[in-house]
């Protein structure tokens, strides 16, 4: 999901990451299949993305809401692991 710039600015990303981790852990304890994966910050585009492994986009949105993270947009993605190609490249 692409997140909105935090009120404290992009310098507050460590706080965003900590809140996202706590929110996904809390939802997991409640039985939701979700895991916070990472945050990717692209300064030249003034964009930041939080990646969750979740059963649905709604679960990721719930984690963001619980963490107090404003979501600009969300899209489901598919991970492709190049190591599974078997050609050594």
Image (cartoon, rainbow, N blue to C red):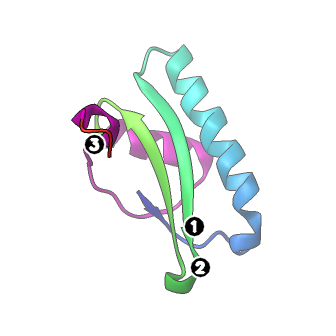
Q: How many marks?
A: 3
On the image, the x and y values in percent for residue 9 come to 71, 75
Q: Earlier in the sequence, mark 3 or mark 1?
A: 1
Disc 1, SS: strand
Q: Is residue 8 left or right of residue 48?
A: right
User: Mark 2 or 3 closer to N-term?
Assistant: 2
Which residue is labeled 2 in the image?
Answer: 43
Report the mark closest to the observer, 2 or 3: 3
Tell me the magenta residue range.
58-86
Look at the numbered disc 2 and give the secondary structure of its residue. Answer: helix
Quadrant position of residue 33: top left
Placement of 33 over or under 87, stated as above or below: above
- The answer to whether 32 appears left or right of 11 in the picture is left
Q: Residues within 10 Å of mark 3 (few under 14, many from 20)?
A: few
> Viewed as shown, does residue 32 lie left or right of 22?
left
Where, quadrant-wise, is the N terminus in this rendering?
bottom left
Query: Label 3: which residue?
Result: 80
| Farthest bottom residue in view | 44
> Can you tell which of label 3 and label 1 is closer to the viewer?
3
Where residue 30 appears, as percent x and y from the top left, is 51, 16
State the image quarter where residue 34 is shown. top left
As displayed, is residue 14 above or below residue 53? below
Disc 2 to disc 1, C-alpha distance: 6 Å
According to the picture, the residue beneath numbered tag 1 turns out to be: 41
Q: Determine contact: label 2, label 1, CB under 8 Å.
A: yes
Task: Say which element carries label 3.
Answer: loop
Q: Mark 2 to mark 3: distance in Å?
A: 25 Å
Frontmost residue, 3 versus 80: 80
């Amino acid at each position: 999901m692409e997140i909105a710039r935090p009120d404290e600015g992009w310098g507050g990303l460590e706080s965003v990451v900590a809140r996202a981790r706590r929110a996904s852990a809390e939802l997991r304890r409640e039985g939701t299949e979700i895991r916070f994966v990472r945050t990717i910050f692209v300064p030249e585009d003034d964009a930041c993305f939080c990646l969750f492994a979740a059963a649905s986009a709604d679960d990721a949105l719930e984690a963001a809401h619980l963490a107090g993270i404003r979501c600009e947009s969300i899209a489901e993605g598919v991970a492709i692991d190049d190591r599974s190609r078997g050609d050594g490249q």
